[in-house]
Image (cartoon, coloured by chain):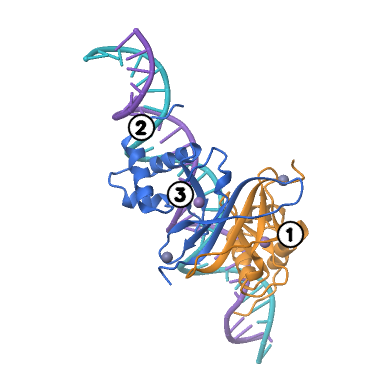
Chain colours: A blue, B orange, C purple, D cyan
Amino acid sequence: MKRRNTPTKEAVLSVITKAGQAMSQDAIEEKVAIDINRATIYRVLNRFCDDGVLHKVLAEDGKQYFALCDGCDETHQEHQHFHFKCTVCETLECLPNAVNYSIPAGYQVENVNCVLTGVCKKCS
Amino acid sequence: MKRRNTPTKEAVLSVITKAGQAMSQDAIEEKVAIDINRATIYRVLNRFCDDGVLHKVLAEDGKQYFALCDGCDETHQEHQHFHFKCTVCETLECLPNAVNYSIPAGYQVENVNCVLTGVCKKCS
DNA sequence: AATTTATTGCAACAACATTGCAATATTATA
DNA sequence: TATAATATTGCAATGTTGTTGCAATAAATT
Ligand SMILES: [Mn+2]
Ligand SMILES: [Mn+2]
Ligand SMILES: [Zn+2]
Ligand SMILES: [Zn+2]
């Protein structure tokens, strides 16, 4: 499965990069310059996640948000940070704070999904 | 809206209590002794959440899990603890560890949803 | 026993995400 | 450059989870 470069991929990544925050499929479809099918957007996003370009966060509104990875390998281990979802402006941002947890012996953590929901500074 | 005691409510709460862990709607419907409509189960669960009997956790599988509250008030502030979702046995359990976070000034946190996903001790 | 109204079942709906398949476009190869 | 291989896309259908309107039922109160 060697990746190919397409206008769709570039447009999606460009929107997320310019936004400077995590975005959901519907927000991307709204902001992107060209018309892209909904299913295609999901496929592009999930491929970026597989490739370590984006990481996925599930927020309490039940939607998936996709954020740029900042120098991560395939394991996505370094994405164990908190996220903040604002209920007013509906944005989700990565916080710099790392998630510190300890689990009972014998448990293997493969993924971390930590979302704080509330009102962001701008909307306060 | 004064609550009424019904066999449905008792049956749902009994299943969760006996399980000793958080449960999703479909798991409850499967385990409960009597036949209860899907929508009714959700309504019962959400009412328990409103009353501070249960708290709701959104896992990475996109499902809502409902866990017993352990001496909490209506704010559910004391439910800021980690949860562990096993991808093998599909169970979700509350961990004793509290979630410690710090957010930038001006941010107001209203809810916390922290789920660690992986393989539990039993399934390792 | 009669009244009030919270609760329930049912079906429809809503929201979000995925999948099958044919058409298209990118990349590699000749 | 022309051809072949196949990754990508659009479209429609499907899947999954959760909610809602409404009439019927049942619990609590009088
Ligand atoms: Mn992030
Ligand atoms: Mn819990
Ligand atoms: Zn905001
Ligand atoms: Zn397990």
Amino acid at the residue labelled 2: Asn
Of all chains, the one bearing label 2 is: A
Both marks 1 and 2 on one chain? no
Figure quadrant of residue C23: top left
- Residue hosting label 1: B15
Q: Relative to B115, is A36 on the left or the right?
A: left
Of badges 1 and 3, the one in the foreground is 3
Q: Say whether mark 2 is within 8 Å of ligand 1.
A: no
Q: Is residue A22 left or right of residue B37?
A: left
Q: Is residue B72 visible?
A: yes
Same-subunit check for callouts 1 and 3: no
Q: Quadrant of the C terminus of chain A?
A: bottom left
Residue C30 position within the rendered picture, expressed as x and y whole percent measured from the top left: 34, 7
Q: Is mark 3 within 8 Å of ligand 1?
A: yes
C28 or B38, which is in the foreground? Answer: C28
Task: Say which residue label 2 marks.
Answer: A5
Q: CA distance from mark 3 to mark 2?
A: 20 Å
Q: Label 1's element?
A: helix
Dot 3 amino acid type: Ala
Q: Which mark is residue A67?
A: 3
Circle 1: is it few (<14), some (14-19), or many (20+) Cα within 10 Å?
Answer: some
Q: Label 3 is found on which chain of the structure?
A: A
Q: Is residue C3 above or below residue A2?
A: below
Residue that appears at 56% across and 51% down: B62
Give the x, y percent position of residue B102.
Answer: 57, 64
